[in-house]
Structures are given as structure tokens and as C-alpha cells.
Amino acid sequence: MSDSELTYAVHVSVNRRSLVSIDKYSIRQAAITFLFGESGIGKSLINRTIYGLLPPDEFTYDVNGVSGEEYAGAARTREILATGFFVFQEPSTHLHPLLTIGEQLREGSLAEDTREQAILTELWAGALSSSPSELLTVYPKPFRPSGGEKQRILLAMAFKRIDRWTAGSVAGDPPLFVFDEPTGSLDNRFRDIVLAMLFQRYRTRPFTAVVISHDYSMVSTIRRDYADLSSSIDYKELRMKDEQLELTPFEPETYLRWLRRQTVPAPKTTDAGIVGKVDSSISVFGRHLMVLQGANGGSPMPLVFRKGSMTYLKAPSGMGKTTLVKVMMGLLRADRFRMEFKGEVLTEKTPEAFWRDHIWGRSMTMVFQHADEALNQQSTVAGTFHGLPLRFPRTRSALTEFLEHLFPPDVIRDILDRKVSRLSGGQKQRLNLLRGLALQTDLLILDEPLNGLDFESSVRVLEMLRRRLDGGSAILVISHNEEIFDSQVRPDDVYYLRESPEMSD
């Protein structure tokens, strides 16, 4: 294994506004680097720049002092593109709408690999979605294939390129592969399948890889299952310091020690403390769903929320978790649904006015998975809280003090009057969470609350949720961060959502 490093100074701007500035971005050759850091800080942009994927007419950039146009056309950059592969966080960025999936899987050098079917079988092992063979004749559209299917297709392309390397078809330095949130649309089981495929091939013939992720629980899986490769695995975190990006080591024990210290809170209330419950059978958009207790085909049970307790709803990606909580909030209309909440019965026939007058922000709040879905991009940070029934005084100083739960004071001074659209992805997510936590509702619904956050911010969010529970609120959480939330939730408060046969009338 080589200990040499690939080192880059990367500077990117648009209309003279700096997007990324880092003087030393180093990754070890013939090693796998797991890169953490909050959303929007520049992880993807730096790696796209190194790959020569930024259009010089849209971005002004340089790499190691070489202008973007010159760098993109350099022989070394062309070699990176020819031998490696970049798995985009949003697969639609790569998939061509005018070519079928099968045609794209066999474009250019990808046609040389004969293991396509074996790779697809690995990536679809036990998947509930369509089989990969059904997708090969499909033209990509916004909603077909699904997000998880598109992600698997792009991963298949990358593994086809890796297999050319491991088979000895490519000579020279180890190629560079970048996986940008490669399992963001997949659950933990498929995440582990992807990791197994990656490390299996690395053992055959080492290559250079960067895996960009917000999923710190990967650390536990890697430490447990791939200890023999520890010398070939680096963990790094991209952080902002004095308006300059720094790439620093991330010590796995930081996460593992924190995890070992976690204790599941004791139950605080009995049945008398039930805030609400959703009947176990739900029908929405023609699909029939069932809430269960017990991971392996457990019994149908109502989804219950108790004062001072966190309820955790699990399901594979695409099953309908987000759809269900939007139905609970009255944001989507179900075909069949029944919820008892604070002495009221809500069904698919309940008028929208009831949710508007009695539920939204008053007794129930939802923090959306994607901050852009919830926040007014043209509002200022301070304006985001205007008009809300806040649980603290409506003063600038009180708002500043509240924001300090997740933002440093100097950052607050800088962003308080800034438009939301000018925030980074991680800043938007923290603002999104604080907006929900600012409301003193009986039930707080969190859809992927740790998305886009660095480890330090994730820990702070969990501490805030503990305090919210201590105050008597009920919390319902949806998250792929199973290891983290399993350490926060009692087993009796864990539920599973599954598709069910059609319900009889």
C-alpha cells in the first residue's frame, strides 16, 4: 500500500463570491477516506473540482494555482475521469433522460465489463422495489426510477469501473473514485451491502476512494467488520475556521465513546400520558400500510405517542414514512386514516380548517427532512420566526440566545439578517430544527433530523430533544441513523411501517 498523498489547493467562486477556499486538501492514495462535515460546507464541490467537473463558464476556480479551464483539460484530470468514477449525491445529475438505463450502464468503457448482472444482483439483494432487469428499458424521469433505484444504478456504474481495475484491465496509479452520499436514499441494510462491495474489491486490488457521508454510524460497522483494513482507512472532517476550510482527522473513538455513554431514558408516563395514537391500518395513494411492533413480522399495533417519550418509526426507504407523517399533519389527504389526538378523532374526512386552526404549530409541529421544503428562501433568518407562537420573548436578544443552541455567537451576528437562500445546507438544517423546537407543541415530528449535520451539531440536537422530553412533549422521529436513535429510544417505543394486503371495508 502506498503512503503517498494527493494534495490540492482548491478555490472556487461565482460572481466574485467565494464558494470554497482550502489550501490543503489531502487524501491518501490506495486508501479509502471517509469524509464527514456539515451539508453545504464544500465537500462535494471540492471533489467535483478535483475531477474537473465544474464548467469553467459558470465557475471561476483554480486547482494548485492552475486555472479551471487549464486544469480541466490537463492530462492528469482526463486520466482521473477515464479510470475513476464520481457517484453523485443526486443521481439525476448524471443520468441522461434520453438514454435508457441499460444504455447508460453500457456507455463507453462500461461496456467492457461482463459482470453487470452480478453487480446489479448484489445491489438489489432483497430489495422491495422493481428488479433491475425491469429498469434497463426505462428512460430516467423525475419519479422513475425511484431515488433509491437511481442511486443503485449509479453505484453499479462505479463498481463496473472498479471491476476493470481489480481485474487488471487498467494499469498505472490507483484510480480515484468519489462516492458522494452513496447510500443517502438507502436504508442501513443496503448501506452495509455497498460497504461490503467496496471493501471486497479493495482487498482484491487497492484503489483510492473518497466516501462523503453524514452517517457517522458507518464507523461502528467498519470497525466491527473491517478491522483488518484499519491501516487503509482514514476518517476526516471538513470544518470552517476563520472563514477558511480545514481538513482535519476525525477520531472514530469520538463517536464510539459518545455512543457507549448513551442510555435509553426510562419511561416517564403510563397510558394516562398518551397524547395520541394512529390506527395501525392506513391507506394512502392506493397503497395499504400497516404499523407493527416487532421488526420481524410483528403484530399490528397503533402508533402511540406519550408525554415525555420519543417514538421511533422505522421502514425501508420509499415505504411511506414521510407520507404518513404528512397525513398526520393534514398536509396530505389519505384514502383511509384514523388518529386520536388530544381527545379529538381525525380521519381522511376531517376538514383542512381543523388542522389549520388546531394542529399546525399549535399542538403538533413537523420538522421536514429537507430544509428547503420548510423554509422561506427569501426570508431572513430572523424573519423565519416572525408570526410563530414562540416559547420565548419576541425580542432580538431572546432570538439570538435561542439560536446559540446550534450556532456560534459570531455566526449568528453574521447571518441574522441574511436571506435563508444564502445559508449553507447545514445552516439551513439547523435553522429548520430550531424553528420547530421554538414551538411548544404537544407532539414534535422529526423527519431525518440529523441530515446534513456534523457530529458536534448532531450531539447538540439530541441534547435539545432530551430537554424537550423532560418538559413533557412527545416526539416522533423518522431516521436512517438507526444506531444513534436506538440508543435514545426504548424498544417498546419502536414501530415499523410495512406494506400490507388490501384492507377490507
Image: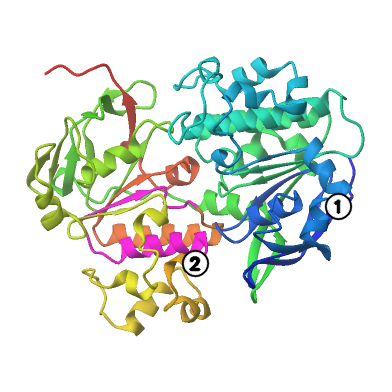
User: Disc 2 marks which residue?
Assistant: 423
Viewer can see residue 321: yes
Q: Which residues are magenta?
A: 424-451
x then y, percent, for residue 333? 19, 38
The scheme the figure's colours follow is rainbow
Residue pictured at 34% horizontal, 37% vertical: 321
x and y, in percent, of residue 24 in the image: 78, 64
**x then y, percent, for residue 157:** 67, 29
Q: In the drawing, what numbered circle is on residue 5?
A: 1
At a point 76% along the width and 53% down the height, the residue shown is 50
Does label 1 or label 2 sit earlier along the sequence?
1
Is label 1 in contact with label 2 (beta carbons under 8 Å)?
A: no
161 lies left or right of 4: left
Please report the residue visible at 54 percent of the width from the left and 61 percent of the height from the top: 456
Residue 302: name its quadrant: top left
Q: Secondary structure at mark 1?
A: strand
CA neighbours of label 1 inside 10 A, class few (<14), some (14 to 19), many (20+): few
